[in-house]
Image: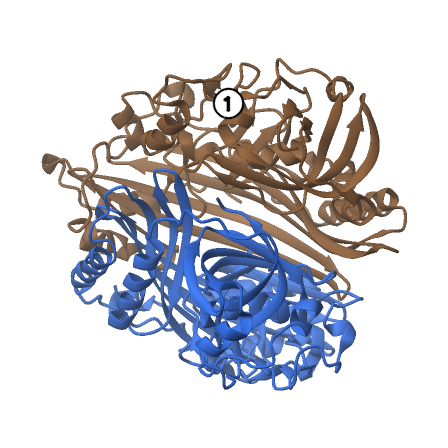
Chain colours: A brown, B blue
Amino acid sequence: MSAGRDDLLERLLASARCDSAAGETAEAYDRRGTSIEIVEDAEGSRLSVVTERGLALRLFRSGRTAFAASPPESADRLPAEARLVLGRARARRGARAAGPVAAAGASGPVASLPPDEASARALLSTFRSALLAAGEGAVSLTEAILTAGVRTERVATTAGRDVVFGSGIATLVATVAGRTPAGSMSARVLASASRPEEFSLERLAHHAVDRVLLPLRGRPLAPARGDLLLDPSVAAPVVGRLAPAFFGDEGDVLLASRTRDGREAFAAPAFSLVDDASAPGGPVKATHDGEGTPHARTVLVSRGIATGRLSDTAAAVRLGQPPTGNALRSAYTEPPAIGVTNFFVDPSPGVAPLDLLRALARGFFAAVLLSRPEVNLAADRFRLHAAGYWVEKGRATDAISETLVEGRLSELLRSVAAVGDDLRFVPSGAGGAGCPTLFVPKWKGA
Amino acid sequence: MSEVVEVCREDAEDAVRIVSALLRRGEGGEAFRERRRRFSWTATEAGLLAPAFAEERGTAVRVRRGRESLLVACDGDGPEALREAAREASRRAGGSPFLKSRSPARSPAGAEAFPVDEEERAAQLGAALHRALPDPRGLSVSLTVARVFVSRAVVTAREIVTCGTVQRLEAGGVLRRVNAARPFAFQTSVPWIPALDLLAHALSDAARPVPAHRAVEGRVDVVFSPGAASVFWHEAVGHPLEAGGGERGSVLTRVARAAVAPPGVTVTADPTRGDLPGAYLADDEGTSARPVALLTDGCVDGLVTDRRAAGGASNGHARCGDFRRPPRPRLSNLIVAPGRASRDDLLEACGNGLYVREISAGHADPESGRFTLFVESADLVRRGALGAPVGPFVLTSDVLSALQNLHGESGDVSHPASGLGLCVKGGEGVAVGGASPAILIRGLTAARGRS
């Protein structure tokens, strides 16, 4: 895949014919990508190879924004399509094309080699072996889907920005089935990374085995008071659901209601939240966002106190701060929207997870989620349907097939007494959500 | 935006020749073309915010040989895109058809002048939102409302088959009050003005304050409204009867021909119902759409298939989210035959329980048969009459038990479901529809949720 320097983008920007005297600006976006997907199931193997290019245009006038996108063959229509509806859009302060990027961040590395089919197949084979070994004959792989892609993006504006950057993404989705004398069940597990080589296949295999065997082998647990230990695979999806509270000025109401207008802490002092596109182990490895703004490390909660927001160009103007580089494009056909890159609980004050387990006097270790967590920021409620182990004096005494952990979200966050040093990520939106093991002593509902 | 969305067919003879030349003895396959236009608005309680127009055009060439299959996709739906995809597919499949490059055909883009009525549509949409939310105080709305047009065609070695052009109005997002938030999803394929009325009605319903009453927990008898029943059938019966469930199949395919539901219960996957969102003329492999009976008179009867699962005996249910993904057996519209009971009859038969009005989401495990339904709106049923509305909760059970405990009589009218929209499986969404009468199921398990 080439870095993508032809004149299509320039022509698109020129054909927008912005009336700069009237404060009109434009932003043109070009995305080229190639990806492969390998599906292996009981009926055989499927290989998909996709090569694609798309362009998009945003027009800005007096706070109004209009967006249009298409493949190259019909890109000449985009200015007319956008202009047609610009007048009907509602004005919102801050909407404008972004200016030049400081020289240091003017461009990022472009993606290099396209995904390799042979190594992708080898990776799937390794995962299958790891799963069969971990499952000890009780677990089989029904379907595995590996997707790997690289893309090059370019953003240019009439305000002087012109940035080219590249990135990669890989996902592995596995449907596994567990069968024991007690019954059978299947479940889907998934992982994402910036490159296939970064998958932790052994860990995913063990997680998949726990996901289908724990519910078949353990006993149900009625909610009861006790200590609570949340595995990263359980805690990370909950953390991911906190993100909208930090989306520009739109999260104001949510954040204010969770902190009583800033008078209370968002979480316990052990709990710090960060968004960082270069975080080690995170599925996102990117230099710029969908508006061409360089990504930054943004501390959103520092030792329990809400301190920051994620922003795009427009939200940054409204917030009166520099943009954090969180305008994400899920596809060239979608306008950029505020989102997370690698959004995680900072593990730097963490201790070894085994030490946290030893600290459990009597309680529940939630090892796997059995369904999507319910997290309602507005109502300040959460509910986890999980399986795991009952622990007494630091030792697992019973496998638990299912239990509910629920209560006030703010109470859970403010009760975190310690975090582990084992940060792990799960896919969340276009990015990833990460968390180390969380220790919550004397949780009333566990 | 132009109302004319038609995938490229001008090169029919050439396209068929290319596909025919690509496929060797023992190979099956086809080319797939898609054109998709989406015109969307971000809607808030204050009105419409940011308009967006997006067009996608794509071509995929698919080759099947034994247990292996290959898909090569690229952007563009014209002759050059087909040549490019066929060349790459041939290279990867080990063949070498001589596909001479031609200068790219001029895109018909210029000819597709857009009528300038988009402003009027925006005004109509704004008015519909205003009707739905006349007093939005205390309410925060974050929705994306979109008009979507999709045109698809399949090029086989013999002909070009039109899958159809679909037009939908979609809406999705979140409604928030001070201490509550709820998801909102809506989809319809009826014409624009009636679609706006349906949207306004659904949004108005969804914007009602969350009831203070909490749902009962534990085992409960449940009457499902026609719309909610459609979601139950889709999750509990539809998904387990999609082919491709692995060596062991699903909880329902393992009991093929067995009586699993009361006599008289007939469930059909019917993509020919043009009034529902899951309709098409031919599936995404070019097989003509036809109704497939899944349950007949309470017995497991059939399953929906594609060419990979059934070869030439495919019953026309190969569907893909877009041109980039290979098709797989997926549901279309699930139709359940009506019975003879009125809603009051069902409430009386229920006695004490719940009347479920709206289910926002659900999922089923085809291996164990366990399913979960997320209920957004429901009322208590007391002594056969509707009582107070209750807050959101979750219903679970397993498919075989639920079907066994299905009341013998169902409602006398089969209504289309507006809440059943996009079915996501493996991260890939396809439009689906449903029409069902109201039903009564005893002994489901209710638990608080989405509070």
Name the image quarter holding residue A426. top right
Q: Is residue A426 above or below residue B276?
A: above
Viewer-proximal residue, A191 or B362? B362
**Residue plotted at (51% across, 39% down):** A375
Name the image quarter holding residue A444. top right
Tell me the chain of label 1: A
Location of the C terminus of chain A (image quadrant): top right
Name the amino acid, label 1. Answer: Val
Residue B252, position as x, y percentages in the image: 72, 72
Left or right: residue B6 versus residue A436 is left
Q: Which residue is mark 1?
A: A274
Image label count: 1
Viewer-proximal residue, A130 or A6? A130
Q: Is residue B96 above or below residue A414?
A: below
Query: Is residue B371 visible from the viewing direction of this image?
Result: no
Label 1, secondary structure: give it.
strand
Residue B277, position as x, y percentages in the image: 43, 72
Query: Is residue A72 visible from the viewing direction of this image?
Result: yes
Left or right: residue B275 versus residue A283 is left
Left or right: residue A413 versus residue B185 is right
Residue A88, position as x, y percentages in the image: 17, 51
Residue A284, position as x, y percentages in the image: 55, 33
Left or right: residue B166 versus residue A120 is left
Q: How busy is the neighbourhood of tag 1: few (under 14 within 10 Å), some, or many (20 plus)?
A: many
Q: Residue furthest left?
A: A21
**Residue plotted at (66% across, 72% down):** B403
